[in-house]
């Protein structure tokens, strides 16, 4: 079966990364934009991880107590036995874990991510073809222009107004579609006057 794409708020949640090499670095870089509290545990920490501001570094071997109160764990060492042990420990404690390059030892997997301001797109081929997931990620990323956040802000700002002024869901949907089309055609032409005109036409 496929993986259901939950979107979970991980800001300020405790995330433990077991491993201090470049594989761990790639995972850290993926989750950092979402602002979890990241702790890295490993006897050796690469310079790139050590240089990241805001991480808690525990330069030593992994201890069972490291995952106490963890929201999620990433096992990213080159020691398969250690990764399997961390996975088993997390299972016992009902902690979500991603074991790098071992789908069978994952409570969740990392999708190919597109992140631009308020837009986040996750792409998964269920682990069958990472290169195709990457192709899709690059295609979607290139299709999002620099105005993406402004479009979202405009559509968000008119939600309350549309709900107050238009009394049916069908007409509300039409209002959003017309305002979106206006934004995509030429965002510099979007004004309160034009938005109010669209809403008046649908009242």
Image (cartoon, helix red, strand yellow):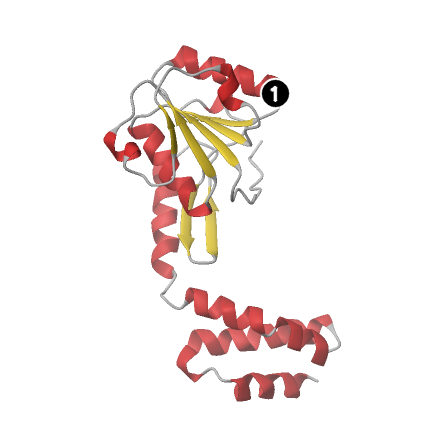
Task: Please name the residue shown 27% across and 37% down the image.
Answer: 51
Extreme right residue here?
167
The x and y percentages for residue 114 are 41, 50
Extreme top residue here?
81
Q: Quadrant of residue 188?
A: bottom left
Q: Quadrant of residue 81?
A: top left
Q: Which residue is mark 1?
A: 93
The x and y percentages for residue 159 are 63, 71
The x and y percentages for residue 116 are 40, 56
Q: Which of 176/130 is in front?
A: 176
Q: Is residue 187 above or below residue 59?
A: below
Task: Please name the residue shown 50% across and 66% down the image.
Answer: 152
Q: Is residue 4 above or below residue 69?
A: below
Quick check: 134 left or right of 15? left
Q: Which of 72/12 is in front?
A: 12
The x and y percentages for residue 77 are 36, 20
Extreme left residue here?
47
> Tag 1's secondary structure?
loop
Is residue 89 visible to the viewer in this orientation of the structure? yes
Is residue 186 visible to the viewer in this orientation of the structure? no
Task: Please name the residue shown 43% across and 77% down the image.
Answer: 185
Assign the N terminus to one quadrant of the image. Answer: top right
Assign the C terminus to one quadrant of the image. Answer: bottom right
Q: Which of 94/190 is in front?
A: 94
């Amino acid at each position: 079966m496929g993986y259901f794409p939950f979107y979970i708020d991980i800001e300020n949640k405790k995330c433990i990364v077991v491993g201090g090499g470049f594989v761990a670095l790639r995972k850290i870089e993926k989750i950092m934009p979402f602002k979890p509290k990241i702790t890295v545990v490993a006897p050796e920490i690469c310079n790139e991880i050590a240089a990241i501001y805001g991480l808690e570094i525990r330069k030593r071997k992994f201890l069972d107590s490291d995952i106490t109160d963890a929201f999620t764990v990433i096992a990213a060492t080159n020691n398969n036995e250690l990764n399997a042990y961390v996975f088993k420990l997390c299972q016992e404690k009902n902690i979500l874990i991603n074991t790098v390059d071992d789908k069978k030892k994952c409570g969740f997997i990392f999708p190919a991510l597109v992140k631009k301001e308020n837009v986040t797109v996750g792409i998964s081929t269920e682990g069958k073809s990472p290169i195709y997931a990457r192709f899709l990620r690059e295609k979607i990323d290139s299709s999002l222009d620099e105005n993406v956040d402004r479009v979202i802000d405009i559509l968000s700002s008119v939600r309350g107004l549309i709900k107050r002024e238009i009394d049916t869901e069908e007409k509300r949907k039409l209002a959003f579609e017309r305002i979106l089309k206006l934004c995509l055609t030429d965002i510099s032409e979007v004004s309160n006057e034009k938005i109010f005109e669209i809403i008046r036409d649908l009242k």
